[in-house]
Every structure is written in C-alpha cells, then in structure tokens.
Image (spheres, helix red, strand yellow):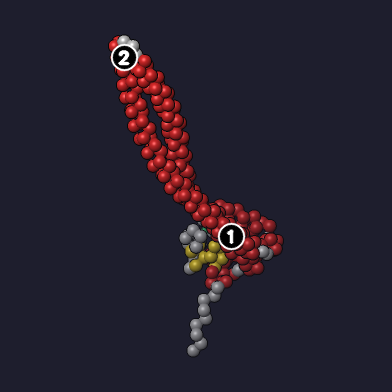
Amino acid sequence: MKDQLLFLLELQTIDNKVKELDAARQSLPTRTEPLRRDLAKLEGMLGGERTKLAETETWKKQQAELLAREQEALRSAKSKLQGSKTGKEYNAASREVDNKRKSINDREAELKKVTEALSSSGTVISERDSAVAQLREQLIAEEAQIAVKVEELARQIAEASAGREGLRAKIEKGWLKTYDTLAGKRGYAVSPVIGGVCQGCQMRIPPQLNNILARMESLEMCPRCGRIIYRKEMLDPPAAPPAT
Ligand SMILES: [Zn+2]
C-alpha cells in the first residue's frame, strides 16, 4: 500500500508542476494586451485624422475650382466694364466687378485658413504615424520574446511530464480514477494528515481512522473532503533527536 501511496504522491507532484507551468504558459500571451489596446486606440485616432484630412483636401480642391471660375468671371466683368457704352451699362459692370472681387477675396482668405489647417493636421498625422510604428515594433519584439518563453515552458512541461504515463500504469485503476476525479474537483487529490487534521479540509479525522493510517496497510479517504489521506510523519519522519 505504501508503494501505491508513493506513486500517487509522485503523480501529484508531477501534475502540480505541469499545472503551474501550463498556467504560466497560458498567461504569457495576455501580457501584450495593454500594448495591443494602446496600438488599436492610436490606429483608430490616426484613421480618424486621415479621413478628416482627405475630406478637407477635397473641400480645398472644390474651393480652388470655384476660385478659378470666379477669377474667370472677374475677367469677363472687367472686359464688360471696358466695353460699356452707356452709364447704365458701366454701373452694372462696375457693380459686378466689385462683387466678384469681394467673393474672390473671401474665398482666398478661406483657402489660406484651410491650407494652414491642412499643414498642421499633416504634422499631427506624421507624429502619430511614427508613434504607431514604434508601438508596432515594440509589440513585435514583445511577442517574439513571449514566443521564446512559451517554447521554453512547453519544453519544461514535456520534461516534467516524462515518466507520468509509466507512473500511472503502476497505480491501481480504481485509485487512479479516484485520483483523477479529486484532482479535477478539488484541485489536488492526496493530502497529508498532521496531528490528526486533514490538511486538505482542516477537519480532525476520527481517532480510529488516524490509527488505521498509522498502520499504512490501506489507502483511506478523508470523510469530509474525500481526499486520499496519509499521516505525514509516516513518510517524512521528524528528524531523530541528536544522540546523547
Ligand atoms: Zn479532508
């Protein structure tokens, strides 16, 4: 029976180690999440800026076309003014020239403002562009580091699991099933009893059971948590008192 208990404990040690390594492996890729979020946010902002820039550029182009048309209209108003024969014609042409000049001035002022705005948003975009590029590089570098660590952990898991199947083959099927069920339900299956108390659930076990455990003739289960129990001092005897 002691052999079976030792096999179960050995299996538990392997399973705990593998579980711990696997948790570390699972958690590694989540480390880049804050960086990914930052990058997505910046990319979103950059996309918005680019859309706005494109819209402004379209608007500027339209304004420039209108300006060209107005300048054309001004030229024809000027030639009408020169060719006017009557005072009435002259007044009308003169008003038209003034109107065209005014709207050309207004539009030129608008265009100047828009050109300035375009230049400053171009600067903002190129700054964001380099920030995004930098974050992307950082992300790639971190992911590469993580990939190395994940691989290393996978190697450690394989190493820790070596011999696991052979060990399981040595354990009686019924106990193996109990072990697997408990490990799944309670986290771990085999628990020491110290001073009559099950360390799995902190219950004091009945004295008769504690006596049975001392004989090491059978595998027993804790009446409360169901874990397979053993008396710790039977496997790790306290250090012998120094000889006197
Ligand atoms: Zn218990």
- Horizontally, is 118 left or right of 216 in the view? left
**Label 1: which secondary element:** helix
Residue at the image position 64 percent from the left and 55 percent from the top: 177
- From this view, report whether residue 47 is shown above or below residue 154: above
- Horizontally, is 103 left or right of 130 in the view? left
How many neighbours does mark 2 have within 10 angstroms: few (below 14), some (14-19), or many (20 or more)? some
**Could you tell me if residue 147 is visible in this image?**
yes
Q: Residue 210 appears at what percent x and percent y?
A: 53, 66
Residue 19 lies in quadrant: bottom right
Residue at the image position 41 percent from the left and 44 percent from the top: 124
- Horizontally, is 156 left or right of 118 in the view? right
129 or 15: which is nearer to us? 129
Residue 90: mark in rendering? 2
Residue at the image position 53 percent from the left and 65 percent from the top: 192
- From this view, report whether residue 32 is shown above or below residue 192: above
Tell me the quadrant of the picture where the N terminus can be found: bottom right
Find out if the beta carbon at label 1 lies less than 8 Å from the nearest ligand 1 atom. no
Residue 36: mark in rendering? none
Check disc 1 and report the residue beneath it: 148
**Label 2: which secondary element:** helix
Residue at the image position 70 percent from the left and 63 percent from the top: 166
How many neighbours does mark 1 have within 10 angstroms: few (below 14), some (14-19), or many (20 or more)? few
